Structures are given as C-alpha cells and as structure tokens.
Image: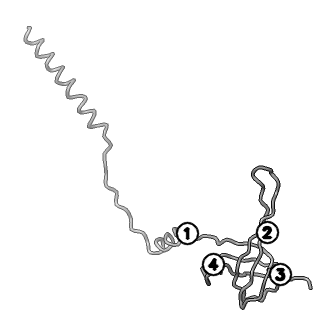
Amino acid sequence: MPTKKKEEEIAEVETAVEAPAETAVEEEPKKTAKAKAPKASSDKSADSTGDKKVHKRAERVGIVASDKMTKTVTVRVDRLVKHPVYRKYVKKRKKFMAHDEMGAKVGDKVRIVETRPLSARKRWRVVEIIQKAEL
C-alpha cells in the first residue's frame, strides 16, 4: 500500500507539472499567415498623391511704396502687434521687393505671395491688385 500511495502522489505531481506547460501552449495565440491582396495600380497612384504634402504659400496684403524698377515693386506691409509689457497695439511695417507683371503703381493695394528666389532680394510676386490708388 505505501508504494501505491507514493505512485499516486508521483502521478499527481507529474500531471501538475505537465498541466501548466500545456496551458501555456494553449494560451499562445496561433499565428496564421494571411496573404495580402496586391493593390491595384489606381490605388497606388491615389496613395502617392495623397501622401504628397502641399504647403500653402505665405500671402501678404500691402501698399506699393515704389515702382521705379522694371517689373519690380516695393510693397509696404503693415501689421499690428501687441506690446509684450504695455499690452498696447504697435504698428509694425516691413518692405518686400515683389515681382510685378500686373503694372501696379504707387499707392495701389496689392496681394503678394511667397515664391522662389527671383533675384538677390526678390522672393515675392504680385498676384492681384486689390484697389487702385486714387489720383
């Protein structure tokens, strides 16, 4: 009898040792290889245009200060900035050299857009004349 009990205890211990190993195997997710369908050529072209980043160019509205150059005008852009200490709005001015094929004159209100460098100081282009100067 004592041998029978020892055999039963040994069998129980073996099953107890084997059981966690079996559950560990069962808990692992089964990995199945899924075949991916090839994309159609139209999908590829749609993805390539969708991934392309289109940056909007900077635009400013200002008044033509000088038109003495050929196909170039100087545009004065005014903006209001709040003073960091006094909290009062201060007028800031900046002059831009812009390429002009529209024929803007001094005093015209124009819209300029950022573009590639056209010369040493010219990086803007006149897009439209918003308001003609009063004579």
What residue sits right under mark 4 in the picture? 115
Residue 18 in the image, given as x and y percentages of width and height: 20, 28
Q: Are marks 1 and 4 in contact (CB under 8 Å)?
A: no
Q: Which structural element holds mark 3?
A: loop
- For the residues labelled 4 and 2, the Cα–Cα distance comes to 20 Å
Camera-side residue of 75 and 27: 75
The way the protein has been coloured in the rendering is one colour
What residue sits right under mark 2 in the picture? 78
Q: Please give the label number shown on residue 53.
A: 1
| Of marks 1 and 3, the one in the foreground | 3
Identify the residue at horizontal 60%, vertical 70% (top origin): 55
Residue 65 in the image, given as x and y percentages of width and height: 80, 80
- Badge 2 or badge 1: first in the primary sequence: 1
In the image, farthest residue toward the right: 135
Residue 54 in the image, given as x and y percentages of width and height: 58, 71
Identify the residue at horizontal 30%, vertical 40% (top origin): 28
Which amino acid type is shown beneath numbered disc 4? Thr
- Badge 3 or badge 2: first in the primary sequence: 2
- For the residues labelled 3 and 2, the Cα–Cα distance comes to 14 Å
